[in-house]
Image: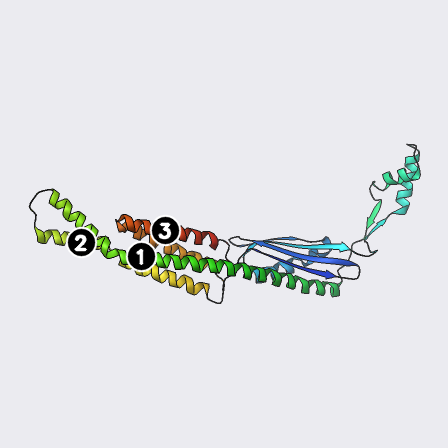
């Protein structure tokens, strides 16, 4: 089971005087990069919110937002009537205008509006905490569904690499024989006498130097380990990244040792599939 780092979660709480919307957006990142936006009244809860998000989301570039929409006649901002009247009186001594025009100017001046600091209602906050959990669950479900799509792609590409590897294994005897024939032909073209026993010894040494048996076995093991990790209980994108690096090393070594054009073409195909896997792994949690 794997999770994507890309996701979206949302939960809406309808209170008697306002609507509270909690939103979570997540993209890929090497570590947890959390950005929180919320009204000032809830700022004292930010550290607690960050801890909850860090515990449950682990990695990703996460944007957390709380939006408030007032749905009733309930506001913390009030007109400072004496101050506004004083401004209007002073303005009448400066400019000619009706009361409506003077009022429009007066309310723009300092202290024309009083904002009363709200205190958090703990009962209300308990409901908001529940909806934060709902938004996190929504985001995780989104991540899981995206992870299933990635998993299908990984399995398909791993299967493709395995099939190509089988072709490499089947081609190996042909490659060795081709190397032998090229060397023998090269020696014969010299039209010089040579010690056949010594030639066979050198040939065996040369072929052993380019033997890819270990690389084929290790690559097969890495492919199996990659599939096992995908099917494990936990999503671990970093671990899958390490395994893909090891796969790349074995594929590169096979390519450098092959010394045989048809096999090198197969190696290029395996590299292409592996690069696509690595690109997608950047999105895995």
Q: Residue 229 at what x, y percent from top left?
A: 44, 64
In 3D space, how far apart are the residues under numbered discs 1 and 2 (Cα atoms)? 25 Å
Residue at (40% x, 56% y) in the render:
244
In 3D space, how far apart are the residues under numbered discs 2 and 3 (Cα atoms)? 29 Å
Q: Relative to residue 189, is residue 141 depicted above or below?
A: below
Which disc number belongs to residue 167?
Answer: 1
Q: Residue reaching furthest top? A: 95
The residue closer to the viewer here, 72 or 189, is: 189
The residue closer to the viewer here, 156 or 118, is: 156
In 3D space, how far apart are the residues under numbered discs 1 and 3 (Cα atoms)? 11 Å
Query: Does residue 75 appear to the left or right of 132 in the view shown?
Result: right
Q: Which residue is mark 2?
A: 205
Q: Residue reaching furthest left? A: 193
Q: Residues within 10 Å of mark 1 (few under 14, many from 20)?
A: few
Q: Residue 63 at what x, y percent from top left?
A: 62, 53
Closer to the chain start, of discs 1 and 3, is 1
The residue closer to the viewer here, 233 or 43, is: 233
Q: Element type at marker 3?
A: helix
Q: Element type at marker 2?
A: helix
Quadrant in which residue 45 is drawn? bottom right
Asked whether the beta carbons under mark 1 and mark 2 sit within 8 Å of each other, the answer is no
Query: Does residue 14 appear to the left or right of 170 in the view shown?
Result: right
Q: Which callout, 2 or 3, points to the residue nearer the camera? A: 3
Query: Does residue 127 appear to the left or right of 188 in the view shown?
Result: right
Q: Residue 207 at what x, y percent from top left?
A: 20, 53
Residue at (36% x, 51% y) in the render:
269
Q: Which residue is mark 3?
A: 269
Closer to the chain start, of discs 2 and 3, is 2
């Amino acid at each position: 089971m794997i999770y994507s780092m890309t996701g979206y979660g949302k939960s809406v709480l309808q209170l008697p005087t306002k609507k509270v919307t909690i939103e979570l957006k997540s993209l890929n990142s090497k570590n947890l990069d959390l950005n929180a936006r919320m009204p000032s009244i809830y700022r004292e809860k930010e550290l607690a919110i960050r801890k909850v998000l860090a515990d449950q989301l682990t990695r990703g570039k996460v944007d957390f937002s709380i939006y408030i929409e007032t749905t009733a006649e309930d506001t913390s901002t009030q007109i400072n009537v004496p101050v506004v009247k004083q401004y209007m009186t002073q303005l009448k001594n400066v400019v000619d205008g009706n009361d409506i025009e003077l009022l429009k100017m007066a309310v723009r001046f300092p202290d024309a509006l009083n904002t009363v600091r709200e205190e958090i209602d703990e009962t209300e906050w308990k409901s908001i905490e529940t909806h934060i959990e709902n938004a996190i669950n929504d985001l995780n479900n989104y991540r899981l569904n995206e992870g299933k799509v990635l998993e299908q792609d990984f399995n398909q590409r791993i299967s493709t690499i395995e099939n190509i590897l089988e072709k490499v294994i089947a081609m190996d005897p042909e490659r060795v024989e081709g190397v032998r024939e090229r060397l023998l032909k090269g020696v014969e073209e010299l039209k010089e006498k040579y010690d056949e026993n010594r030639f066979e010894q050198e040939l065996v040494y040369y072929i052993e130097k380019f033997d890819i048996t270990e690389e084929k076995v290790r690559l097969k093991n890495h492919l199996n380990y990659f599939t096992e990790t995908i099917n494990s209980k936990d999503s671990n994108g970093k671990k899958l990244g390490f395994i893909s690096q090891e796969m790349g090393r074995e594929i590169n070594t096979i390519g450098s040792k092959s010394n045989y054009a048809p096999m090198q073409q197969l190696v290029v195909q395996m590299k292409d599939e592996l690069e696509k896997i690595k690109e997608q792994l950047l999105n895995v949690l």
